[in-house]
Amino acid sequence: MMKLLSQRLLGPVTLVLLALTVWLGIWVTPPDRIQGNLARLVYVHPAVAWVALYVSFGTATIASGLYLWRRTRSMVMDRVAHCAMEVSAVFIILTLITGSIWGRPTWGVWWAWDARLTSTAILGVFALAYLALRRANDDVEVRARRSAVFALLAAINVPIIHFSVQWWKTLHQNATVFTSTRTLLIHGIMAWTLLISFVAFTLLFFWLLRARYRLEEARDEEVARGLEEALAERQREGVR
Amino acid sequence: MSVAEAPGSPVATLTGAVVLVGGFPLLSGVDLTLAGGTVNVVTGANGAGKTSLLRLLGGLVALSRGEGRVCGVDLARGERLELRRRVGWLGHEGSFYDDLSAAENLTFAARALARPVTGVAEVLERVHLSARADTAAKRLSAGQRRRLGLAWLLLRRPQLWLLDEPYASLDVGGRSFFDGLVLDVAAAGATVVVSAHDTLGVSSASARTIRMAGGRVVEDGS
Amino acid sequence: MSVAEAPGSPVATLTGAVVLVGGFPLLSGVDLTLAGGTVNVVTGANGAGKTSLLRLLGGLVALSRGEGRVCGVDLARGERLELRRRVGWLGHEGSFYDDLSAAENLTFAARALARPVTGVAEVLERVHLSARADTAAKRLSAGQRRRLGLAWLLLRRPQLWLLDEPYASLDVGGRSFFDGLVLDVAAAGATVVVSAHDTLGVSSASARTIRMAGGRVVEDGS
Amino acid sequence: MIRLALVVARKDLLIERRSRVLLWQVVPFGLMALLLAGLALGPRGAGHSNAAPGLFYLVMLLVTLLMINRSRAIEGAPGTRSSVATLGIDPASVFLGKSLALAVELWLAGVVILAGAVVALHTALGATATAVPSVVVTLAALACAGTLYGALSGGGEGPATLLPILSFPAFAPLLIAGERSYSAALHGGALWQWWVISLVALVAYLSVGILLYGVLEES
Amino acid sequence: MIRLALVVARKDLLIERRSRVLLWQVVPFGLMALLLAGLALGPRGAGHSNAAPGLFYLVMLLVTLLMINRSRAIEGAPGTRSSVATLGIDPASVFLGKSLALAVELWLAGVVILAGAVVALHTALGATATAVPSVVVTLAALACAGTLYGALSGGGEGPATLLPILSFPAFAPLLIAGERSYSAALHGGALWQWWVISLVALVAYLSVGILLYGVLEES
Ligand code: HEM
Ligand SMILES: Nc1ncnc2c1ncn2[C@@H]1O[C@H](COP(=O)(O)OP(=O)(O)OP(=O)(O)O)[C@@H](O)[C@H]1O
Ligand SMILES: Nc1ncnc2c1ncn2[C@@H]1O[C@H](COP(=O)(O)OP(=O)(O)OP(=O)(O)O)[C@@H](O)[C@H]1O
Ligand SMILES: [Mg+2]
Ligand SMILES: [Mg+2]
């Protein structure tokens, strides 16, 4: 019952929250004193980055870990890892794009050799490399193992990105939204909008993940259906 | 090697084994039981799936559907590394290092297996390669490479011998040496699976002949 | 191909041919004359130098000492590229592109030779590979690769056919197809040199048997 | 000759399309190398725009090396597998065809890497556009030189690692010419002069290749 | 485990000594790349000494890639040829052995390239000497990471070109850490901090390799 409800509701709720974020972000919250309307990117960029780094990359990492652990090894985990990583690649690219758009007016450049930006880009390459690795192996089991190990190795990068702003003096914003003491630095409607944006993008991720997973499942089913035919044809070869 | 199963008890059992590579079924449902200490010859037309069957038995490809147990290892659970330790493989390529000499290759194998290195010279003698002991493996002739492959297997003494077209490239002397070897090995309790187009010397003897076609076993002369 | 020499006139003559690779003599002085339109079988123990002889005749290794003339090309003068155009080679590896399908490989060959591309399907049919026309060459089985190699030669129709252990990996049907092919080719005026450990179907017929040992010809049953 | 060259080029590009090595492996590698080179020079951001032309060509050089290795791997050992050897295609056509295929691949890779350089190294887009003709010519010259050197280092026992050392000295002048004309496009200066050097190199490598490729393949 | 690792390392080094790929091909390539990188950055000579640490590590990275390809080529396709597969050596030993052999080779190459950097890029000799411990550790970490990524990209259908894209993102932090600690040695600054990062990376890759190499080889 709960499961059914959540399945039915995930899509609509995501849409509503995204719409709410847009409405609050554009019409309700005030423009920033210094940055003007550009500051509204704060309702997109951090949320997208959060999803890219923690939610989706984290999902992919955990699923990969579960695949490698003998007891929980199953193709489901492999598929989840694959789909999550694909979505993650999209979100990392979105992070880079929104960040660049924001960076042009605030820092005067699209790109800088800043530790956080660079490490984010490197994470993006990790995600792309993961997808390339999957393409290069067509033995199902080999592919699953290799990509799982690779995902685990890539995950080491995530904490580096997070702490990069503290370890290296950088251009990028320090932790402004949530400081290390977990106090909220911005208030009122802005804080609420920010919170809603985080929830909305997180739900968007799970929605996309589910859609992608189903697609993969359907593809596998189709392959399985084709398999019967292929088997029959292969067996007929002998008779001829 | 350590787990010497009772002779006669099955070394390998496959039920409905399917191997898919890139969506194509190399094997399309193989049912087979191989008893320990026997010699089995797999025949069939080109592309019938002989090499694929041997590769499955050796843990070199994954089982896509069906069940299989080889040398006590469950193929479906993906412990192929474990399996590979117990089987010996002789294919067209040769499983040794091209830049090392024949003797160096075998010495490495002996060291890795913690066997006395003195066995190397003796094994080389048996396959008639003593004169080429110091020649780099890549410079050996086709038949000499085959012989080196046999020497490597002799050192390893695996539980299950998988030999893909062993007669290819071997000269007359090599072939009769091979026949003797196979009978010895089987007598010592190991199981031998050979794929072949030729009529082997051993076929006339005790061997069981398995004919494949279209990725399946179509005739089993056990 | 253009220069059709009179049948019976020698296609290849070697006098005291020595081939050194890394200081080791692969051939240690070969004297041999091959007449046009004949079938020649080279035999000998492993490492006797059969493959080396074929490679020399195909222009794949240089002549270190002695003299040689193959298909009108002087080996000592180093015009091996010219020679390679006139000979066809079938070895263990297969001379085609692994990533292209069987049909694409042959289409490329046909285009490069300015032959009609329609010949490809027909050639594939002859070697019984029609069912695998769209399979990447690297996925073919050992015997199918051999057949593809034969198809490639069939398209090229070289003047001198050099076939290294052609029976290896071929099934019974393939072998008899091969026997027929060789006799056809010889009848059409081309020369065939085959290295073999097996008793070939053609040996019984008109073929001349050349036995090698230690890098030399030791017996010539011409 | 041209017909045969097209047959050869088509075959190489078909194989490339099959294996998608360029798309999935070489181009991402190039972008990565760009990022890393940026990193290796440290975060003193200002210097980057100056270094951009040099880095671009350095990366393209690495890409070329990878692609030549691929192109060589496709042909396999000479004599047994190469198309010249088994089909008697005249070597000049093989050279032209392989160079053409390599050039097409390099151009494709170049577009992406150039875009990466513009975004990541803050090079001016307009000035980069003026540099395009010289880039096209230089990459074509690289392709010809690469094919030639691929054949030189190829086959026999020599593993793929022999290639870099053989080809690097030949690539150096191209690298310099390309870098200078790109720099000139960015900062002003005599553009055509270096451009002509690349063009001369292209013509030189083309003619040497057409004349001498056969000698290399023969051995 | 250690005994077997030594057997494996010894075999790899023996093969290397036979083929002399390191001596005749990889090291000259590294020196060449160093010169070219110097060229690519233009004749603004002054900048070179600043760039030296970055260039040194960039070159060592390329050298590592070449050596991993070699090490992979030696083993051949997994399953049919690799020593683990046919001899049942436990994978942790294979990983350790191959990493050790690779590290030794990288150290040897590093000495030469470092000398090249001192001569060609005018880096201070004394300061370079202080950087040696960090170089040793960083190269060892590169070797472990390289062996791991070699196994990841290896075998099956994947051509050698997959390796760079897989390993580059992992090498990047090593590159940065190495560069910074070398720079610190040259210009003063906190040396140990980056040194520790390299050390942590070495330990991390070692443990991951020992634990997971089997999973990779099995496939
Ligand atoms: C291409 C450029 C950029 C990239 C790749 C990038 C990347 C990231 C990443 C990965 C995070 C998440 C960090 C974490 O939660 O651990 C983040 C957060 C954030 N970014 Fe960016 N960013 C870029 C540009 C910018 C710009 C120009 C600004 C504003 C001036 C900005 C403001 C922020 C803020 C406010 C956060 C949330 C900080 C926090 O809560 O820790 N970013 N960015
Ligand atoms: N992707 C694919 N598409 C179509 N067919 C494929 C594919 N991959 C493999 N095959 C076919 O699978 C079969 C593999 O057979 P295998 O190598 O086991 O044959 P074999 O019995 O050893 O033959 P041979 O006697 O020639 O060695 C071949 O017929 C090959 O053409
Ligand atoms: N550098 C070397 N040192 C010593 N011997 C060498 C060297 N290079 C090649 N050989 C020997 O030269 C011979 C080459 O023979 P070739 O390959 O022509 O034999 P073959 O008659 O084709 O044998 P097979 O029947 O096994 O195919 C082999 O005996 C090989 O061991
Ligand atoms: Mg087979
Ligand atoms: Mg031979």
Image (tube, coloured by chain):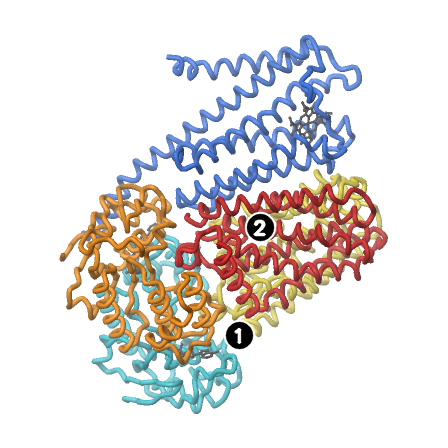
Chain colours: A blue, B orange, C cyan, D yellow, E red
* Mark 1 closeness class: few <14, some 14–19, many ≥20 residues within 10 Å: many
Residue E180 vertical placement versus A56 (above, below): below
**Percent position of residue A112, x then y:** 74, 36
Query: Is any atom of residue D134 visible in this view?
Result: yes
The residue positioned 30% from the left and 44% from the top of the image is B74
| Pick the front one: B10 or C176 | B10
Front residue (pair C69, B192)? B192
Whether the residues at callouts 1 and 2 have beta carbons within 8 Å, the answer is no
Q: Which residue is mark 2?
A: E144
Q: CA distance from mark 1 to mark 2?
A: 42 Å
Residue D195 visible to the viewer:
no
Q: What amino acid is labelled 1 in the image?
A: Glu
Picture quadrant of residue C152: bottom left
Q: Secondary structure at mark 1?
A: helix
Q: Nearer the viewer, residue A170 or D195?
A: A170
Mark 2, Cα crowd under 10 Å, few <14 / some 14-19 / many 20+, is many
User: For the residue marked with disc 2, what is the amino acid?
Assistant: Cys
- The chain containing the residue under callout 2 comes to E
Query: In this picture, is D169 found above or below A115?
Result: below
Name the side, left or right, on which A176 lies relative to C219: right
Is B119 drawn above or below residue A29 in the view shown? below
Q: Which mark is residue D218?
A: 1
